[in-house]
Image (cartoon, rainbow, N blue to C red):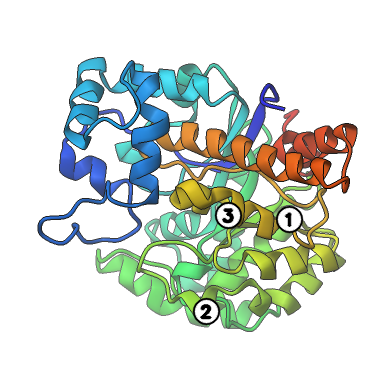
Amino acid sequence: MDDIGLIDHHCHGVTRNDLDVAAFEGLITESFDPPPAGTSHFDGPLGLAVRRWCAPVLDLDPFPTPEEYLARRREVGADEVARRFLKEAGLEAMLIDTGYRSDEIHGPDQMADLAGAPAHEVVRLEAVAEAVARTGVEASRYGEAFAEALAEAAAPSSAVGFKTIAAYRGGFGFDPAVPSPEDVARAAEPFLREAGAGAGPRLADPVLIRHGIWTAAEVGRDRGLPIQFHVGWGDPDLVLHLTNPTLLTELIRGLAKGRVNVTFLHCYPFHREAGYLASMYPNVYFDVGSALHYHGPSSATLLAEALEVAPFTKLLYSSDAFGLAEQYYLGSVLHRRALRQILDRWIADEQCNAAGADRIVSLVGRDNARRIYPLSS
């Protein structure tokens, strides 16, 4: 069970630099703010998991002080730290979202070298839209220009899927229908003005967001490229209740008609809703992503809840690691431990046998991702 190579279907690059206390703590929280005076972000489930599970990889005993841990991390050096944790994660492949703070972190080629595993790109729709806006395109041509840029970004030699951060740009309460070219051109005007003024731009118009989703569905249809949706757990830039995936029900139904798969990322505290949708619609998949390592000692509880009603063929593995290679390792360790605890209990209760447990481990860890992403490309 622990030997299977995991396909991390949603992750990011890791930092190129050594980190001081403030920089490291900023990467073990989703908050934008420093911890209250006299406290530390290490005093939480993720910080505890780092001290317990990551310390031995850096040749420390479990549970060093944060100061001891970070001193050793700097002594080892950023690239060697990344190499150790990535290799210990036991990855078969990484599917890397390259659309966020890419100037601060390693890209797919460097990540592949550090991990000793293939790295594939996932194209962030909003990043492509914002790049198109900076070209000075006319509003009447924005829709066409976006489609061309997206097709280029998703060329078979580089990309295996798309991602939208609609959750961070107003949530999921938008009209699910395909917008008309006239509506797209109208919505593009203020967006392009913002780009022309040198401010941003930041794609937040719901018409342009759903235009991006439906364009991705069309561009990726022949190759079967899934569309990833950030759901639930994330930083304070979102309004949590507006990221409940059940708000996407009509969109899911529309995409299902075109046989476009959607994958919900993270999902906590809506992992049960995501499991329900995965059980109802053939094109819905989900993971519990970074929420798993943020749960630390409670990770088995979260994963067990995700497995309550969802078909075993619909749950995926991801770490959503960003910046810290520790998150790649913790995602793997906590996933493997949690799934083993759950399945050992099912076997002890005579609700599963060893062969069935092995199949579930393989489905969730890699087989489901192999089936829905064109990784052979």
Instruction: State the SS at label 1.
Output: loop
Give above or below for 207 relative to 264. below
- Which residue is at 25% across, 66% downward? 199
Q: Is residue 206 visible?
A: yes
Q: Earlier in the sequence, mark 1 or mark 3?
A: 3
Give above or below for 17 relative to 49. above
Kind of residue at disc 2: Leu
Which residue was labeled with disc 1? 307
- Which residue is at 52% across, 66% downward? 232
Q: Residues within 10 Å of mark 1 (few under 14, many from 20)?
A: some
Compare residues 336 and 176 and report the one nearer the observer: 336
**Residue 313 x %, y %:** 82, 48
Kind of residue at disc 1: Leu
Per the rendering, the mark at residue 163 is 3
Per the rendering, the mark at residue 211 is none
Question: Mark 2 against mark 1, which lies toward the viewer?
Answer: 1
